[in-house]
Image (cartoon, grey):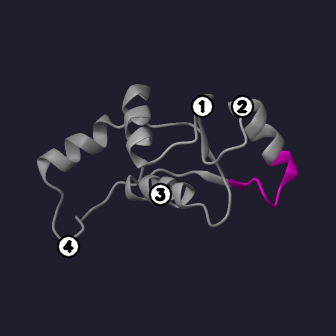
């Protein structure tokens, strides 16, 4: 997670923002399996970006090995699929990733 010196409006982060940032799970590795032009995949990337989480993107359309691994991990062909330190969430939207992330803590 990126430590921000200023908030989104050029202000210093509030105490609440600093506490929230400290409480988020800090993963060792995040891999996001996506399909291009997938709205749910874009939502997942936006959520991760908004929370300052670094991740690797694996395009399962362009990379057959990534597709095979996504299927092996999730048991399905739907995207997105996220692998956070070996914990898998498949076929999700922004609400589901927020709950999943909270449960990682």
Task: Give the magenta-colored segment's residue range.
Answer: 58-66
> Dot 3 corresponds to which residue?
43
State the image quarter where residue 74 is shown. top right
Of labels 2 and 3, earlier in sequence is: 3
Q: Are marks 3 and 4 in contact (CB under 8 Å)?
A: no
Of labels 3 and 4, earlier in sequence is: 4
Pinpoint residue 54: horizontal percent, then vertical percent. Answer: 53, 52
Q: Is residue 16 visible?
A: yes
Q: Secondary structure at mark 1?
A: strand
Question: Where's the C terminus, which quadrant?
Answer: top left
Q: Are marks 1 and 2 in contact (CB under 8 Å)?
A: yes
Pinpoint residue 46: horizontal percent, then vertical percent. Answer: 45, 60
Residue at 50% of width from left, 53% of height from top? 44
Residue at 66% of width from left, 44% of height from top? 78
Q: Residues within 10 Å of mark 2 (few under 14, many from 20)?
A: some
> Dot 1 corresponds to which residue?
88
Residue at 16% of width from left, 68% of height from top? 11
Of labels 1 and 3, earlier in sequence is: 3
- The image's mark for residue 10 is 4
- The image's mark for residue 16 is none
Distance Cα–Cα, label 1 vs label 3: 17 Å
Distance Cα–Cα, label 4 vs label 1: 36 Å
Closer to viewer: mark 2 or mark 4: 2
In the displayed image of the protein, which residue is found farthest to the left? 15
Closer to viewer: mark 3 or mark 4: 3
Q: Is residue 12 magenta?
A: no
Q: Secondary structure at mark 4?
A: loop
Q: Secondary structure at mark 3?
A: helix
Distance Cα–Cα, label 2 vs label 4: 41 Å
- The image's mark for residue 73 is 2
């Amino acid at each position: 997670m990126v430590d921000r010196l200023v908030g989104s409006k050029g202000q210093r982060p509030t105490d609440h923002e600093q506490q929230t940032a400290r409480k988020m799970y800090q993963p060792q590795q995040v891999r996001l399996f996506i399909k291009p032009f997938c709205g749910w995949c874009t939502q997942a990337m936006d959520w991760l970006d908004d929370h300052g989480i670094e991740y690797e993107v694996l395009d399962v359309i362009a990379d057959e090995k990534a597709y095979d691994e996504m299927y092996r991990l999730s048991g399905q062909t739907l995207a997105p699929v996220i692998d956070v330190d070996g914990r898998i969430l498949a076929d999700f939207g922004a609400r589901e990733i927020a709950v999943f992330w909270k449960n990682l803590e």
